[in-house]
Amino acid sequence: MRAVVQRVSRAEVRVNGEALGRIGTGFAVLVGVAVDDDESDAQRLAEKVAGLRVFEDGDGAMNLALPDVGGGVLLISQFTLLGDARKGRRPSFIEAAPGPVADRLYERVATLLRAQGIDVQTGQFGATMDVELVNSGPVTILLDTKRLF
């Protein structure tokens, strides 16, 4: 699984103008599921997101994680994170998991984060969504459960 994690002061997702999810302080997390991902990848990603220490403590150092600041997660499925644009100008998405598999693992990440007491809001899997956020910092972290980067 791949994820783009952005520390936000607020974030919202809308489908057809209707707000489906909204958070204040926390993370906007875009998640792409690969064809070879499984339950262990969902677990690894949820643990990493929940434990990322990128919120400032009283001394201004990035030492605090989501639970420490009472932050939420806006979790958005985004298969285009698996796009391969190394050749040509049109990305290939053959590494992206098929819809039913991707949806199941995406929902599993949400469930695992909620089990840790984190407020998780989501978009609508497979829909065209408008995501609005204010990146705080800015802080943006790239994650890959296969540790490709």
Image (spheres, rainbow, N blue to C red):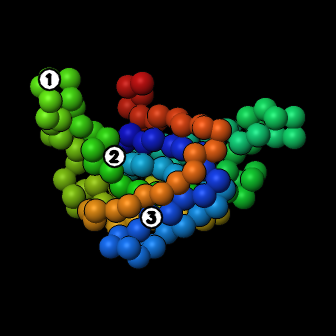
The tag earlier along the polypeptide, 2 or 1, is: 2
- The residue that label 3 is drawn on is 13
Q: Quadrant of the C terminus?
A: top left
Q: CA distance from mark 3 to mark 1?
A: 32 Å
Amino acid identity at mark 3: Val
Across and down, in percent, residue 10 comes to 60, 58
Residue at position x 28%, y 65% from top?
127
The three-letter amino acid code for the residue at tag 2 is Gly
Which label is found at residue 87?
1
Q: Quadrant of residue 3?
A: top left
Asked which quadrant contains residue 58, the reply is: top right
Dot 2 falls on a residue whose secondary structure is strand
Q: Amino acid at mark 1?
A: Lys
**Residue of label 2:** 32
Circle 2 or circle 1, nearest the eye: 1
Report the quarter where the N terminus lies.
top left
